[in-house]
Image (cartoon, helix red, strand yellow):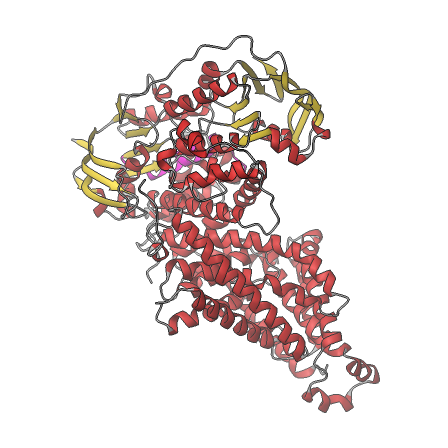
Amino acid sequence: MKLEKLDPTVKACTSLVCVILLSFQYLVSLNIAVFVLSLLLLLTCTRARGIQVLKLLLPALVAAFGLFVTGYFHGRGTRAEDLQKIAAMPYAVRAAMSTGLYPALQISTRLLAYAGFGLLFALSTDGEAFIFSLMHRCRLSPKFAYGILAAIRLMPNMVREFKSVRLAFRARGMQLRWYSLPPVFTMLVNSIRWSQCVAMAMESKGFDGDAPRTCSIVPKLRWYDLAFFSCWITGILVGMCLLRY
Amino acid sequence: MDAVTIGDVTFRYFPEGKRNILDHVELRIPEGGITVLTGPSGCGKSTLAALMAGLYPGNGGVLISGDVKLWGRSVFSMRPQERAAYITMLFQDPDLQFCMSTLRKELRFCLENICVRPDEIGTRSQQAAKALGMEALLDRPLDTLSGGEKQKAALCCLLALDSRIFLLDEAFANIDTRTAREIVSHLRSAADRGKTIIAIDHHAELWQGAADRVISMGEAQVVAVPPKRIGAGDVPAVVLRDVTVRRDRVLIEGGCAVFPKGGMSMILGESGSGKTTLFRSLLKQHPYEGHMEVDGRDLTAIRQKELFCKVGVVFQKPADQFITQNVLQEVQASLRLWKRQEDARTLLEGYGLWQYRKYSPYMLSQGQQRKLAVLSVLAGGQEILLLDEPTYGQDSRSTAVMMEQLRRKTEAGLTVICITHDEELAKVWADKIYRLEGRRLYEA
Amino acid sequence: MKWKLKDILMIAVCAVLFGVIFLGATYAGGALYGLLLPLGMPSLGYEPFYGLYFMAVAFAVYVIRKPGVGIVAEILAAVIETLMGNFFGPIIILSGFVQGAGFELIFALTKYKRFDFKTMALAAVICSCVTLGYNLIVSGYDMIALPVLALMLAVRIVSAVVIDAIVTPRLADGLARAGVLGGYAVCEGVAKDLDC
């Protein structure tokens, strides 16, 4: 069973609901469990390769480490509800709480848990499939759906063009910094031009956006979509009830 | 009955502007056959095409008077879906016509638009692809196709949509001649099956033998054929020795060339052969192996800023290199950046651009944009000019005017190196022609 | 408002561009992160670029000037960012909604009549506060000490005001003058020199 087969909208909803649930808790163990489980699922049940995972994971780790350091040195201290539970905690945890290690872990592992969901979604979902699924499940209008797909297709052009615009500017004798605005302006002109051209091309191919059109691919909901959704939600709810720190 | 009837059409882009791009235009195009519309760039051909296809004024501009009728029905009263049964269009830029990632998906998108039953979509896509021999490319990412293949893919969509008119707007501007001829022959057979083909093209010669009628808009084309210069270039301005350039694969292997000072040299090659990459190497923007020399000095020994001071470049899309928002400022900025003491007015007048001095460069026609780009680059006093595909989006008359101006500059010592896929351009203007073909760079 | 295909594509393509710029800027911001590490607040290193997040909504609102544009534009940008492979995945669609709503609030209150610097700046400030509120709840920023949070908010506000109330309107005005935004509300009031 590969996660690529799951309905993208269900996957997106799962991660949205889980994230909202996770934002109401401060359990380091649950965060880590979610993160580890996501990575495990990613490596065993998707076609994502390790190196891909690492590439996307890296910025998440950097951000989490940043939050950890910030939380450690500039944390708000122990929360009131945590103080009530403090008696039941082992010595190691109590020691950690007094130094700010625990709040630092709370905030940084939460980000990791989110990143786990994000990666699980990003690396097991095809962009087009996601948009089509949104069109059927969430009534995303075809105008928006195909507009988004067309715009995404221009991204490689944009990166290439941005480089050549910057070269052209420097060849004209302009000193450019990375934040220089004139190339951005030129790129905006290009982008708007491109969007007009693509819009006309799509319209010329009979795309209306409001008129009815046929759909040759209708994604179906299957039992495992709902199973995936309910397993995650139940898992997190159970974790929130049973886990202590 | 006429397929297209254009009656008294007046159109402008800016409601508050004074210039009408089309002024009381009348035109009839009969049903069937291939009709080619020619005319100088800036005469409103492309605007007319967008109007015929019903894309304007919905997507821009103001229709002040008149109507466009397809078989007697006003195109402006039809919804896009209805219009697709009458007229579909092949555009100039191969990169800006698709919204999906592969041809198969794009065909599905097209057929869904006109409400083809889902179970017929597969066969109809297959048929369209087969007609153009594109079956092998159906599932290849469109990004990886060459410009010519992309245009064929776009034509595939038109075939699948099966409208009564196929309208082409400068569809061959940036693809190699071979693919262009192939597309023309496919269109000829479509015309023989009863389709009406309308092509807006300033390269009328591509259609010779295939077109049933040619209508020219605006003034007649004049191509000045200048005398060849003899004796130019005893001193080399740019020398390539044993140069190898790669990008993903080897583009040029062991290329040797000498570009004489005060000469106009051209490198001919199809798109994707590595011409532009060679320019980037020459500007120290792309790695190369071997030896390159500018003005007798090894390229590696010249600092970047010094190089830009010597070598100017005008890219395929001149709009990419405007650094200000006004024609006059554009030239002034160059003079200021390179600390030159010339008068911007004289320069602009020399290129016939003074009257547009208050315009934004982006509002000029392609031909004027390129002239302005050349002018503002040369205002910096560069002695070597790299020119990338000067015919792109431009008719032969304005190309000729620009080349003539450059020719005069070469007599004063300017070196021009131009890359193009246009054989005609090279034949007429070059002192020296190199060809880039199958990784080899050789003198023709 | 009634969205036409060309409006959607215009905003979507610009959102892709802003996304590309944002990616580039965060690389440049890596240095800042490192610099702030010894001070114990590397997370502050992300804040100066926060204004770039709101660029799509600021641009859309300023150019089109109609109700709902901001929220739709920012959700559009968020979906695009999800597809571009953001490690946060679909959550950013939620944060996109919050950002869009935060930015558009002030325009809704002033009935979409004023788009001068003051209103844009106010929108940027409100949006910064709203998004920090979102961070407090969702990202667990409530674990961070108040002074640091205040510093973060201050940097975020400055960034948002500079990028979204100064730079973005200037770019949009330039585009209007250059004649590429024909038909949009931003063109009204922008003088165009068409006659020579």
Q: Position of residue B71 (x, y in %)?
A: 18, 36
Q: Position of residue A56 (x, y in %)?
A: 66, 56
Kindly identify the residue that appears in the image at 58 percent across and 62 percent down: C89
Give the quadrant of the N terminus of chain B.
Answer: top left
Residue C131 falls in which quadrant of the image?
bottom right
**B158 in the magenta segment:** yes
Q: Nearer the viewer, residue A79 or B329?
A: B329
**B136 in the magenta segment:** no
Question: In the displayed image of the protein, which residue is found farthest to the top?
Answer: B230
Residue C140 can be seen in this image: no
Kindly identify the residue that appears in the image at 52 percent across and 27 percent down: B387
Residue A96 can be seen in this image: yes
Q: Position of residue B73 (x, y in %)?
A: 18, 41
Q: Position of residue B364 (x, y in %)?
A: 38, 37
- Dominant SS of magenta comes to helix
* Left or right of B278 in this view: A83: right
Give the quadrant of the C terminus of chain B.
Answer: top right
Q: Nearer the viewer, residue B106 or C154?
A: C154
Measured along the vertical axis of the image, is residue B87 above or below residue A222?
above
Magenta range: B144-164
Measured along the vertical axis of the image, is residue C171 above or below residue A224?
above
